[in-house]
Amino acid sequence: MTPITDLTTLRDALRAFCAARDWHRYHTPKNLVMALSVEAAELVEHFQWATPEESLALAPEKHAEVADEIADVLIYLTELADVLGIDPIAAARHKIVKNAAKYPAPAR
Amino acid sequence: MTPITDLTTLRDALRAFCAARDWHRYHTPKNLVMALSVEAAELVEHFQWATPEESLALAPEKHAEVADEIADVLIYLTELADVLGIDPIAAARHKIVKNAAKYPAPAR
Amino acid sequence: MTPITDLTTLRDALRAFCAARDWHRYHTPKNLVMALSVEAAELVEHFQWATPEESLALAPEKHAEVADEIADVLIYLTELADVLGIDPIAAARHKIVKNAAKYPAPAR
Amino acid sequence: MTPITDLTTLRDALRAFCAARDWHRYHTPKNLVMALSVEAAELVEHFQWATPEESLALAPEKHAEVADEIADVLIYLTELADVLGIDPIAAARHKIVKNAAKYPAPAR
């Protein structure tokens, strides 16, 4: 397997992973957005009772769990973009241009 | 600004974007996971009444809206990983190894 | 229409509302949990950048918007429970007994 | 304790439950909407890979788990409405009137 070093190699690794398990039949956009939102909520769960300050100072074990949840969100997001034929980096680039027009930076 | 071509240049562009607007003070992990989950739900909203089949065949206008929502999720995920000092690609690589052990591929 | 004064009359009003619009065909549990999670996220959106203290002191207009979102969550929750044949009050009563066993109150 | 038979007695039971555990200090609206959205996602998780048809025919054990998740959503929704001084039934009644104006029933 090619090493995973960016979103393209991640996408390719996930294609191979799902093909080997015959999981593509479950991967409709409808199902993948559900899975993505569940993983996002697992991230929320780690922070729901924390103060904003506590949320910045995670214990090492918790930090590793949060990294795993970030990975899960990124994995489902990559799979969703793949079945829809969307390039996530191009989409983000496009959205930042829109955001810059919507929220102009104040003059300094 | 350096062109956005991968998660590292996206992270750097977002750092500059937020610094220019003094938004970093809002970007605690607690707030960012909330924003991330809201964007994930905006993705869900596009598919909530669709059949699985319909979810695979989006009209062009809807497809563009979904691309924007994918961008929003990726943007908040990148900002969250940044404030926590987590490399999302490394986290995904690590998680896929764990998933492969948890869900072995059937022999062919 | 019978006035809505509790969860039972709310359920009955929602049955009539959906029947008049032929919406029951969309109301599979899968679709309803998606709609419920979207409304929950719209609640989250009102509080994502607020400090915990600010979240306790809503401006009147915002308070009314939050009341509408609470209504939306309650509406979808009632419809979901209805299609699954679940009594939400009985379920809550049962869950509180379980929670009391799981989290015993400290002695005073 | 008064038996839980409706949303008012549920609210009162939850007040007593939290007071006995000194949990009110965690129950800011910001924290409660996070907890609510996490429970909504646990509902979603039960249905993410199911077809719409499968979602209508739950096995008994799964049905009981879903009832527990419905209870959790109702519990946090009741607590959120309580700290905000919102009557959920009145809010739903008000929202249904708005929805009826927004989505008129077709003539028969």
Image: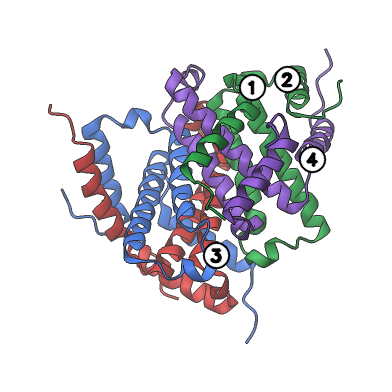
Chain colours: A blue, B red, C green, D purple
> Mark 3 — on which chain does it sit?
A
> Mark 2 — on which chain does it sit?
C
What residue is at 58 percent from the left and 42 percent from the top?
B61
Q: Residue furthest front?
A: C108
Which amino acid is tagged 1?
Answer: Asp
Label 1 packing within 10 angstroms: few (<14), some (14-19), many (20+): some
Residue A29 visible in rendering:
yes
The reply to whether callout 2 and callout 3 are in contact (CB within 8 Å) is no
Query: Which one is in front, B3 or C50?
Result: C50
Q: CA distance from mark 2 to mark 3?
A: 45 Å
Q: Quadrant location of the N terminus of chain D?
A: top right
Which amino acid is tagged 4?
Answer: Ala
Which amino acid is tagged 2?
Answer: Arg
The numbered mark at residue D91 is 4
What residue is at 15 percent from the left and 48 percent from the top?
A1
On whether disc 4 and disc 3 are found on a single subunit, the reply is no
On whether disc 1 and disc 3 are found on a single subunit, the reply is no
Label 2 packing within 10 angstroms: few (<14), some (14-19), many (20+): some
The numbered mark at residue B45 is none
